[in-house]
């Protein structure tokens, strides 16, 4: 295990990761500390899971079971575990947090205001993520520069000051065509919703198919006007919990 200064050495690590292929990037990430990969089961995340499973990299794979995922996503979790002989840890929201959200905003109150939507994401995703990353020093993600304008400058490595860990984005420079080619060449199981116009898949009530010419993540929280909208997992944002 290599000891690094997460702030001083991030630039050098970026350069090093940029010279490696995907397997090399994940192999290096695994040597830096306790690595956890959080997957949404989207097509890019499936590529990373395939590499971890195929090469048996010592990287823990976790997902956020928000209780509002598409049935296709839930089925894919089981299929992926079987395909790569791995265990995907599920992290769920606390029932008391969900109950408090519903009491304050209503079950689908996230449609009514940005505040309510952030609160829902906080309860169902941000707080469970904190538990998924507990004890981790390395957080592996499937972020790509081509996913949205908000992610256009995604580096290979960055220090997450809020969570005090090193974040590795091994697919930062991969475009969607390269992702699809890998999936086809390696028979990677993917969510059937991708073929129905859903390039980015989250919770069922908050995801729609995109229209021709729209960015990949245009179908997420589509009723909001902010083009840089996120759920709070990859931006510094305090989760709002109803009380």
Image (tube, rainbow, N blue to C red):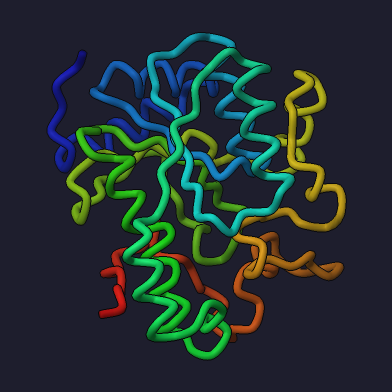
* Residue furthest bottom as drawn: 112
Please name whichever residue, 232 or 177, is drawn nearer the observer in this view of the structure.
Answer: 232
Observer able to see residue 211: yes
* Residue furthest top as drawn: 55
Is 207 on the left-hand or right-hand side of 64? right
Res 13 quadrant in image: top left
**Vertical side of 164 occupied by 52: above or below:** above
Q: How many numbered discs, if any? A: 0
Query: In the image, residue 2 lies at what x, y percent?
Result: 19, 17
Query: In the image, residue 162 lies at what x, y percent?
Result: 20, 56
Query: In the image, residue 201 lies at what x, y percent?
Result: 66, 55
Q: Residue at x 46, y 66 (%)?
A: 231
**The N terminus sits in image quarter:** top left
Observer able to see residue 234: no
Q: Residue at x 25, y 80 (%)?
A: 243
Please name whichever residue, 204 or 157, is drawn nearer the observer in this view of the structure.
Answer: 204
Please name whichever residue, 123 or 97, is drawn nearer the observer in this view of the structure.
Answer: 97
Q: Residue at x 50, y 48 (%)?
A: 65
Is 212 on the left-hand or right-hand side of 128? right
**Vertical side of 124 occupied by 42: above or below:** above
Query: In the image, residue 237 lies at what x, y percent?
Result: 30, 69
Q: Residue at x 34, y 75 (%)?
A: 100
């Amino acid at each position: 295990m290599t000891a690094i200064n997460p702030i001083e050495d991030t630039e050098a690590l970026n350069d090093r990761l940029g010279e490696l292929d995907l397997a090399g990037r994940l192999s290096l990430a695994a040597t830096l500390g306790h690595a956890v990969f959080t997957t949404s089961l989207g097509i890019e995340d499936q590529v990373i899971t395939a590499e971890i499973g195929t090469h048996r990299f010592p990287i823990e794979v976790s997902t956020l079971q928000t209780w509002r995922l598409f049935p296709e996503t839930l089925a894919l979790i089981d299929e992926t575990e079987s395909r790569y002989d791995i265990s995907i840890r599920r992290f769920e929201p606390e029932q008391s947090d969900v109950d408090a959200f519903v009491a304050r905003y209503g079950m689908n109150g996230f449609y009514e205001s940005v505040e309510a939507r952030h609160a829902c994401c906080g309860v169902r995703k941000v707080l469970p993520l904190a538990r998924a990353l507990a004890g981790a020093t390395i957080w592996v993600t499937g972020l790509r520069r081509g996913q949205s304008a908000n992610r256009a400058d995604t580096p290979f490595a960055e220090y997450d000051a809020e969570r005090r860990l090193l974040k590795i984005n091994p697919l930062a420079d991969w475009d969607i065509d390269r992702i699809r080619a890998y999936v086809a060449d390696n028979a990677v199981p993917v969510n059937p919703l991708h073929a129905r116009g859903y390039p980015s898949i989250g919770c069922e009530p908050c995801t729609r198919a995109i229209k021709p010419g729209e960015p990949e993540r245009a179908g997420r929280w589509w009723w909001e006007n902010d083009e840089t909208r996120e759920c709070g997992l990859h931006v510094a944002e305090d989760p709002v919990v109803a009380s």
